[in-house]
Amino acid sequence: MTSVPAQLLLVLLSLLLGLPAVEAVEAGDAIALFLGVVLSITGICACLGVYARKRNGEV
């Protein structure tokens, strides 16, 4: 089984490689999608960090 970062990288690469096949998607759309994915992953990691600190009593 592959690690979580490797799985995330595979998902991101598959999304980015699939974008040029759709002609209606422009560079701005690809950048917006990439930023959305990055910000979503960052937000999930931040929430997990807050949850872990609360669980360990490190508030």
Image: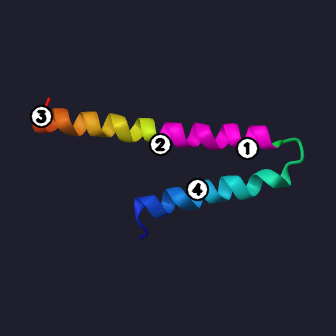
Q: Is residue 9 left or right of residue 32?
A: left
* Mark nearer the viewer, 4 or 1: 1
> Mark 4 or mark 2: which comes first in sequence?
4
Contact, mark 3 vs mark 2 (Cβ under 8 Å): no
Disc ID at residue 58: 3
Decide whether the magenta segment is chiefly helix, strand or loop: helix
36 inside magenta stretch? yes
Give the residue at mark 1: 30
Residues under labels 4 and 2: Cα distance?
12 Å
Label 1 environment density (alpha carbons within 10 Å; few <14, some 14–19, many ≥20): some
Residues under labels 1 and 3: Cα distance?
39 Å
Residue at image point 57% right, 61% down = 10
**What residue range appears in magenta?**
27-40
Q: Which three-letter amino acid code belongs to the residue tagged 1? A: Ala
Question: From the viewer's perspective, is residue 52 above or below residue 5?
Answer: above
Question: From the viewer's perspective, is residue 49 above or below residue 15?
Answer: above
Give the residue at mark 4: 11
Q: Viewer-proximal residue, 27 or 5?
A: 27
Give the residue at mark 2: 41
